[in-house]
Amino acid sequence: MQPEFVWTILGQEIHVHAYALFTVLGASAACLAALPLLRRERLRRGEALGLLACLVPAFLVGARLFNYVVNTDAYGGSLRLFSLRLAGFSMYGGILGVLAALLLWSVWKRREAWRLLDAMVLPGAAAFAFARVGCFYNGCCGGVATASSLGLYFPLRDVDKSPIYNVLSMLGQSTTPRIKVYPTQLFELVLALVLVLPIVWFYLRGKLPSGGAFLLYAAAFSAMRLAVLPLRSLPYPDVVTAVVYPLLYGSLIVVCLAWFVRRRRNTRV
């Protein structure tokens, strides 16, 4: 865990927060990957750039709004949707925000939304992977404590605020207690990339109906999140982790797979 990187450039120390850095890298990678794929779907360069300019803020607003709904106490009763602070995001809220913006844009420009959604599968997976690297360095979105060989040791947060820390520091003793937890950030990162590769391969070769890549990856991604959910340590109320999230993931899996089968039957590839 390394929440902050410190680099020395021209004799000056530059402090960069890991979470913010990888969030920006993820957004940049997603946009770079999306441009050729959107052009492949016959969008002009200006149209593609305009769409991406709509999707980025839509993700941030949707992610923060959803996080507020499931974790209201963390906001102290004050919702700041447009805060520039890169924290307090929920993945599925961001996805819903992107979906809403993309659908509105496709209606406005009279473009087929399914094809645009397909084009955003690989960029979305890339952005998620970078974000999970940022979470790993930041020490957030981690797993529950475990004695398993799959666990990694993480330093406890805010330990420097405890009186025992100050006493041990004065005595010259090691004062960095650690806890072994599941690195669920890395589990999700690897699984998200492994799942996207075959889907993108079929998509690029025209083996899927329009919308097929999006629906398959939405189902696979939700299945991955459902599988990792019991290993995650989340600051949400029990009803969210035990009821809301499992129902959300399970419903998405069923709906997306059923929709894919229907489109497969009705579309000649």
Image (cartoon, helix red, strand yellow):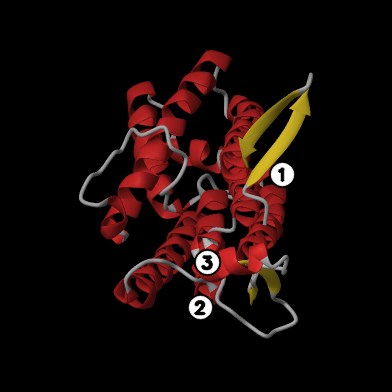
Say which residue appears at 72% left-offset and 49% top-offset. Answer: 201
Q: Residues within 10 Å of mark 1 (few under 14, many from 20)?
A: few
The residue that label 2 is drawn on is 230
The image shows residue 110, relative to residue 133, as above or below, that is above
Indicate the amino acid at tag 1. Arg
Q: What secondary structure is marked by label 1?
A: loop
Query: Mark 3 or mark 2, which has the lower sequence index?
Result: 3
The residue closer to the viewer here, 199 or 9, is 9
For the residues marked 3 and 2, what is the alpha-carbon distance in whole angstroms? 9 Å
For the residues marked 1 and 3, what is the alpha-carbon distance in whole angstroms? 27 Å
Query: Mark 1 or mark 3, which has the lower sequence index?
Result: 1
The residue that label 1 is drawn on is 205
Q: Is residue 170 visible?
A: yes
Query: Mark 1 or mark 2, which has the lower sequence index?
Result: 1
The image shows residue 90, relative to residue 151, as above or below, that is above
The residue closer to the viewer here, 243 or 215, is 243
The image shows residue 22, relative to residue 8, as above or below, that is below
For the residues marked 1 and 2, what is the alpha-carbon distance in whole angstroms? 36 Å
Q: What secondary structure is marked by label 3?
A: helix
Task: Say left or right for 72 vs 128.
Answer: left
The residue that label 3 is drawn on is 225
Indicate the amino acid at tag 2. Pro
Say which residue appears at 69% left-offset and 68% top-offset. Answer: 171
Q: What secondary structure is marked by label 2?
A: helix
Q: Residues within 10 Å of mark 2 (few under 14, many from 20)?
A: some
User: Nearer the viewer's eye, disc 3 or disc 2?
Assistant: 2
User: Nearer the viewer's eye, disc 1 or disc 3?
Assistant: 3
